[in-house]
């Protein structure tokens, strides 16, 4: 146990923090200087950004997504209720494992940004794809910080809404700190002070990122979904994984026939095109084995009715609280696009290899396809509909496509759930030709 003086000091700081959180949640506030300092220390000297539909330079979604993942290492105690079985010596190790994971996700974004900077400074690439410099812009760290301040001012109401649950997060953090005070005398004081110091700036950054992501998603949902059956999309069975047959469906033909005769038919697995349609409740999804014989995750291949420059993917999944098996949700995912022109294919594939360095060693197992986007579906946020940008600027490369593959590399079951389910997948972009069959 900590001595009484240390306990009083921690409790006094927690009470002060509770007052500040209540103040922030009830009125519009300024961005904490410590939040800006946190971002400033993390940022590289230059970032690649794009322009929105109005011609304004904006911070891309993948920055906000990487930022949310990164600040979780600073905000560990605010996630989820206390589990007394996990706050132990192993619990401290779990927190450090999470820190490594978030660091990896942020590092992945930084590596991708570095590769894009290299491409934009490569005269041969720019000469071959002159629109790259029109579609992408390199700005220094100082301008990024200014854009973040501007985003805070423009999204104050949305940020305030996103910060509404900070009191609940603080309650969770307080419970965890109290538990550590009893179990880890040496570490708990330092951990408690660090959590208290970073709670508000981390909470503000998380809320700002969430507000920007939600705003961009809402805009995306007003656009044409080219993975809709209504726009002519059909499943390409050749590259699509098989359905997962649940044990309750895997019965002998005689029993299936008898059940059908008495009017109590055994259901069959949903077809892959279920993931292209609207859904209402648990089970309105397409499920496939989480790994095939070669260790690959499920793939959903689609031939679209139009040829487009893809620029956004939207993944819909049921909320974990409404699911019988939350671990079946996809986790690390990627989008592949078919490029039929051999010369263009090799040029785009080279850029893809540079940007997705961590994924480049994994074979695609689809001739003529190129990896154009990777992302992580986040099961731990309240938003079950999430949008992700296509990192390769297909329009600038002149690489339109009407064939895509959405692949889930793993799920949230961490090996304990042997199937992955997709409720709905959308793809947005700029249309080039309709119909889009090459």
Image: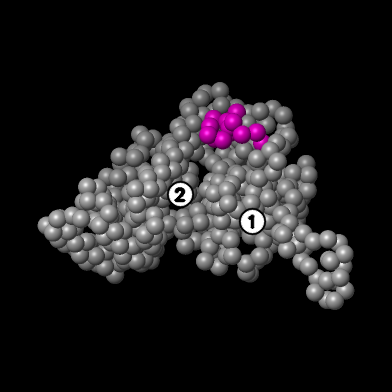
Assess whether residue 357 is covered by the magenta stretch. yes
Measured as percent of width and height from the top left, residue 328 is found at 60, 56
Q: CA distance from mark 1 to mark 2?
A: 22 Å
State whether the magenta stretch is mostly helix, strand or loop: loop
* Labels in figure, total: 2
Please name the residue shown 62% across and 38% down the image. Answer: 371
**Within the image, what quadrant is residue 106 found in?**
top left
- Asked whether, in this view, residue 131 is left or right of residue 157, the answer is right
Residue assigned mark 1 = 421
Measured as percent of width and height from the top left, residue 54 is found at 49, 52
Rendered-image quadrant of the N terminus: bottom left
Question: In the orientation shown, which residue stands out farthest toward the bottom?
Answer: 262
Please name the residue shown 37% across and 35% down the image. Answer: 44
Dot 1 or dot 2, earlier in sequence: 2
Measured as percent of width and height from the top left, residue 148 is found at 35, 49
In front here: 405 or 322?
322
Residue 349 showing in the rendered view: yes
The type of colouring in the image is: one colour
- Asked whether, in this view, residue 374 is left or right of residue 22, the answer is right
Please name the residue shown 51% across and 56% down the image. Answer: 379
Q: Secondary structure at mark 1?
A: strand
Rendered-image quadrant of the C terminus: top right
Q: Which mark is residue 65?
A: 2
**Within the image, what quadrant is residue 25 found in?**
bottom left
For the record, the magenta segment spans 350-364
In front here: 101 or 227?
101
Please say if 368 is above or below 425.
above
Q: Secondary structure at mark 2?
A: helix
Is the residue marked by circle 1 packed among few (<14), some (14-19), or many (20+) residues within 10 Å? Answer: many
Measured as percent of width and height from the top left, residue 94 is found at 40, 47
Is the residue marked by circle 2 packed among few (<14), some (14-19), or many (20+) residues within 10 Å? Answer: many
């Amino acid at each position: 146990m900590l001595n009484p003086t240390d306990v009083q000091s921690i409790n006094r700081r927690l009470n002060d923090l509770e007052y500040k959180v209540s103040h922030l949640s009830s009125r519009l506030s300024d961005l904490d200087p410590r939040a800006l300092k946190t971002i400033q220390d993390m940022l590289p000297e230059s970032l690649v950004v794009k322009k929105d539909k109005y011609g304004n330079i904006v911070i891309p979604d993948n920055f906000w997504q990487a930022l949310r993942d990164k600040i979780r290492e600073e905000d560990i105690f605010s996630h989820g209720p206390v589990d007394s079985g996990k706050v132990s010596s192993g619990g401290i190790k779990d927190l450090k494992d999470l820190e490594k994971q978030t660091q990896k996700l942020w590092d992945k974004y930084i590596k991708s940004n570095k590769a894009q900077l290299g491409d934009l400074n490569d005269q041969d690439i720019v000469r071959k794809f002159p629109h790259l410099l029109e579609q992408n812009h390199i700005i220094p760290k100082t301008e990024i910080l200014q854009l973040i301040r501007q985003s805070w001012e423009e999204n104050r109401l949305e940020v305030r809404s996103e910060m509404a649950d900070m009191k609940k997060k603080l309650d969770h953090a307080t419970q965890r700190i109290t538990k550590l005070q009893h179990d880890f005398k040496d570490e708990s004081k330092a951990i408690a002070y660090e959590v208290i110091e970073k709670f508000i700036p981390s909470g503000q950054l998380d809320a700002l990122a969430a507000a920007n992501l939600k705003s961009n998603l809402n805009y995306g949902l007003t656009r044409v979904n080219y993975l809709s059956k209504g726009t002519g999309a059909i499943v390409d069975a050749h590259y699509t994984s098989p359905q997962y047959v649940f044990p309750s469906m895997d019965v002998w033909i005689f029993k299936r026939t008898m059940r059908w005769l008495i009017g109590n038919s055994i259901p069959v697995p949903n077809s892959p095109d279920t993931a292209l349609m609207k859904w209402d409740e648990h089970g309105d999804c397409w499920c496939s084995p989480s790994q095939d014989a070669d260790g690959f995750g499920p793939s959903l291949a689609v031939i679209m009715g139009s040829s487009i420059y893809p620029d956004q993917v939207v993944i819909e999944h049921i909320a974990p609280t409404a699911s019988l098996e939350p671990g079946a949700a996809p986790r690390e995912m990627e989008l592949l696009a078919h490029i039929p022109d051999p010369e263009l294919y090799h040029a785009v594939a080279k850029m893809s290899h540079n940007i997705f360095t961590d994924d480049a060693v994994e074979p695609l197992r689809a001739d003529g396809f190129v990896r154009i986007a990777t992302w992580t579906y986040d099961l731990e946020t309240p938003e079950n509909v999430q949008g992700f940008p296509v990192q390769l600027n297909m329009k600038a490369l002149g690489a339109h496509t009407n064939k895509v593959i959405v692949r889930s590399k793993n799920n949230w079951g961490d090996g304990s759930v042997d199937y992955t389910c997709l409720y709905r997948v959308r793809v947005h972009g700029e249309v080039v030709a309709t119909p889009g069959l090459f």
